[in-house]
Amino acid sequence: MPFTPDEIGLLADAELFRRKAAITAKIRAQLEATLSALKSELSGIRLVTPPGFNPDTHQLVKGEHLEDFPFQYLDYPKHFDGVNKFTIRTLVWWGHHVSCALILEGAEMRRYKKHFVDRFHQLAGQELELSLAPTLWEWKRGEGYTLPITHDRKARLAAVLAERSFLKIIRCVPLPDDRIRTGQLPQLSCESVRAMLPLVAS
């Protein structure tokens, strides 16, 4: 298939690729700073975690094809062991948003669900949303994908959660947000984790 003139213009634009590389490096540095900030934030906090959980495990990932868009993320702490999952993911999804998500599945789900109901009003009203997707790996938000955790939705959210075998709480921040623009990703991630802690604190 032939290229359009616009496509050739993009393909030949060396500056575009230099800028992409520079932005990628800045995101990587911010995610590394986020790792340090989260380690400090979670130090000394007792969490409800699955068997074999190691609080020091993490990963930094970069890819090009999250629905055709580049992405970079930090998982810390990172626990993926069969059905057991306990992970906090800070995801920068180019063209979309920054997501801070708590991903839970497996042995402790009954306790997480109980905490969700018993501590609901500690979670509500903090820009958190419950993922409605049939998989943990969906990152879109909005109608059909997520449901905001607000004080008036306790019964509805509890009913949704009761039918699910996993739990993903997500906070999405638009890329033009001043906190993103000024490099405050570590602070933003820590704030999000603080808001989610009632769900997993012992």
Image (cartoon, rainbow, N blue to C red):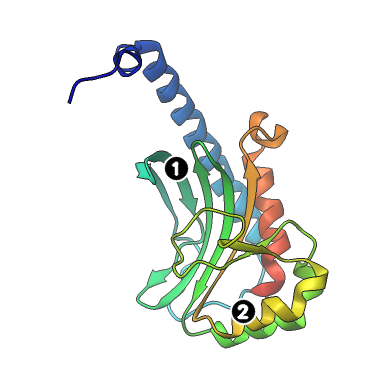
Counting residues from the N terminus, which is met first, the one under dot 1 or under dot 2?
A: 1
Residue occupied by mark 1: 72
Residue 2, x across and y down, in percent: 19, 21
Asked which secondary structure carries label 2, the reply is helix
**Residue drawn 49% across and 81% down?**
165
Residue 63 screen position, x and y as percent: 36, 42
Q: Toward which corner of the image does residue 83 lie, by quadrant? A: bottom left
Give coordinates of residue 149: x percent, y percent: 72, 66
Placement of the C terminus among the 4 image quadrants: bottom right
Badge 1 amino acid: Gln
Camera-nearest residue between 94 and 46:
94
Distance between mark 1 and mark 2 Cα atoms:
30 Å
Of the pair 77 and 123, the residue shown nearer to us: 123
Q: Position of residue 36 (x, y in %)?
A: 57, 47
Query: Mark 2 — residue?
Result: 160
Q: Quadrant of residue 57?
A: bottom left
Q: Is residue 101 left or right of residue 201?
A: left
| Residue 48 makes an appearance in the image | yes
At x 69% / y 67%, what residue is drawn?
197
Q: Amino acid at mark 2?
A: Val
Q: Is residue 202 visible?
A: no
Quadrant where the N terminus sits is top left
- Residue farthest toward the left in the current orientation of the protein: 1
